[in-house]
Image: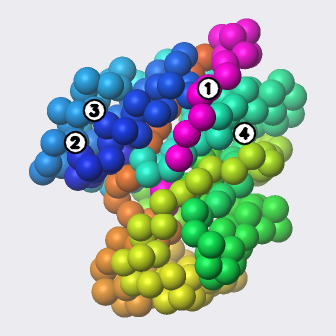
Amino acid sequence: MPVLNEAELIGSFLRELRGRAPGAEIIVVDGESHDDTIAQSSALADHVLTVPPGRARQMNAGAEVARGDVFFFLHADTLIPQNAIDELSNALRNDAVLGGCFRLRLPRREWIYRISDSLGNVGVEIFGFALGDHGIFCRREKFFAVGGYPDVPLMEDAELYRALRRHGRMCQLRQVIVASPRRYEQLGPWRTTSYYILILALYVAGTPINTLTAIHRRLTGGAQIDLQSTHSASFTAFDCAGALARQTTAPSAVRQ
């Protein structure tokens, strides 16, 4: 879980995650927070690491110490489906499937949010990449085979997903992950969605990551509102065989 200064939500997120995935190995990778994130995480996670900030760097550090044979990457302000572990485990029963992600839903009624979350879901199906809010999961050996997350300042989730697709089949599950709209509310949903569309369009067109980063910073003034923040993602790992055997059913509940 690459996090940075998430003391306000990390406790509730970890308790919810533990309830929905009781057999998971939960790893929090802190990017040198200045608040109470580490202390709260230590009481609820299996492992808490501290590394220099950077989402790709943090998630790769978590992967290095994880023991599970399936990795599941989440944002710390998301709500996973009740049966998330069962669903991804069922998908991985097919040996041809290397991993995948869930569908995205933003918990607001305004139709601008439907444009945004629908765009992300279509991006997975049509253009073959997923962002962190979708909850990317994959087999351990394939994660390391593609070199893990590339250490780039933007779109590291999309780059990983595309790299995995070059090695085999990735699937988008029907269940939805509910993501916090807090990033959209920083600059406004209309403005944020328009920036989101522009960056994704340029990415699909092959614009270099460094150029996308410069455009993004110019548009947002450096605000952490969009596709890439240096924090607020979580990493869990679990034993696939164990999860399949347990057929975990999690209780009900509600973020690169």
Q: Residues within 10 Å of mark 4 (few under 14, many from 20)?
A: many
Left or right position of 253 against 175: left
Mark 1–mark 4 Cα distance, whole angstroms, equals 21 Å
Q: Considering the numbered disc 4 on the image, is that residue within a helix, a strand or a loop? A: strand
Q: The N terminus appears in which quarter of the rendering?
A: top left
Q: Identify the element where label 3 is drawn.
A: helix
Residue occupying the point 41% across, 67% down: 182
What type is the residue that disc 1 sits on? Ala
Mark number for residue 41? Answer: 3
Q: Residue at x 75, y 32 (%)?
A: 87
Distance from label 3 to label 2 (Cα)?
Answer: 6 Å
Residue with the mark numbered 2: 37
* Disc 1 target residue: 250
**Circle nearer the N terminus (1, 2):** 2
What residue range appears in magenta?
A: 240-256
Which of disc 3 and disc 4 is earlier in sequence? 3
For label 3, count other residues whose C-alpha is less than 10 Å away and answer few (under 14), some (14-19) or many (20+): many
Task: Residue 72: give its label.
Answer: none
Work out whether 50 lies above or below 218: above
Which residue occupies 16% across, 42% down?
Answer: 36
Q: Secondary structure at mark 1?
A: loop
**Which is more N-terminal, label 4 or label 2?**
2
| Residue 189 drawn above or below residue 135 | below
Which amino acid type is marked by label 4?
A: Gly
Residue type indicated by callout 2:
Thr
| Disc marking residue 99 | 4
Relative to residue 235, is residue 57 drawn left or right?
left
Tell me if label 1 and label 4 are in contact, CB under 8 Å. Answer: no
